[in-house]
Image (tube, rainbow, N blue to C red):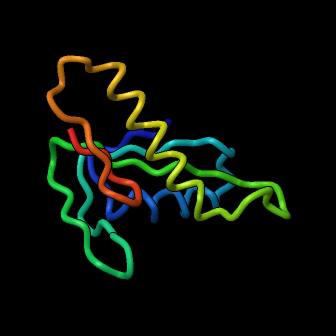
Amino acid sequence: MVVRPAVDSTNSEASRLLAAGADHGLVVRADCQSAGRGRRGRTWVSPPGNLYCSLLARPPIPAPAPLATLTFVAALAVHQLVRAALPAARTVALKWPNDVLV
């Protein structure tokens, strides 16, 4: 795991690390992002106090399933993990495709 206090975007940082030879499975986490990206080119407001991370994955070619499904599977896994880890949390919800709200 690479932890940064601030990045432009965890996706951009993961891409730079990939180009530098980072390993499959590396997680990039930041306390805030100055240029976070949402879906369809939207900006993503990323103030401190939330979790921002990207997973560097190098799937086998050809991939066994459409790569877009990985986002949904990851969101479901994190949702289940948070619910198990924080049983007192009033609400743990998914905002598709990949946001977990606590």
In the image: residue 70, left or right of residue 46: right
Q: Is residue 54 above or below residue 19?
A: above
Q: Residue at the location (25% across, 67% down)?
A: 44
Q: Residue at the location (81% across, 55% down)?
A: 60
Asked where in the image residue 18 lies, by quadrant, the reply is bottom right
> Which residue appears farthest toward the right when viewing the image?
62
Q: Is residue 88 above or below residue 66?
A: above
Q: Residue at the location (27% across, 51% down)?
A: 6
Q: In this view of the protein, which residue sits in the foreground, 76 or 22? A: 76
At which x and y percent is residue 96?
36, 59
At which x and y percent is residue 53?
40, 48
Q: Residue at the location (38% across, 81% down)?
A: 40
In the image: residue 28, left or right of residue 9: right
In the image: residue 78, left or right of residue 17: left
Q: Looking at the figure, which quarter contains the C terminus?
A: top left
At which x and y percent is residue 87?
25, 18
Number of callouts: 0
Q: In this view of the protein, which residue sits in the foreground, 68 or 35? A: 68
At which x and y percent is residue 98?
40, 55
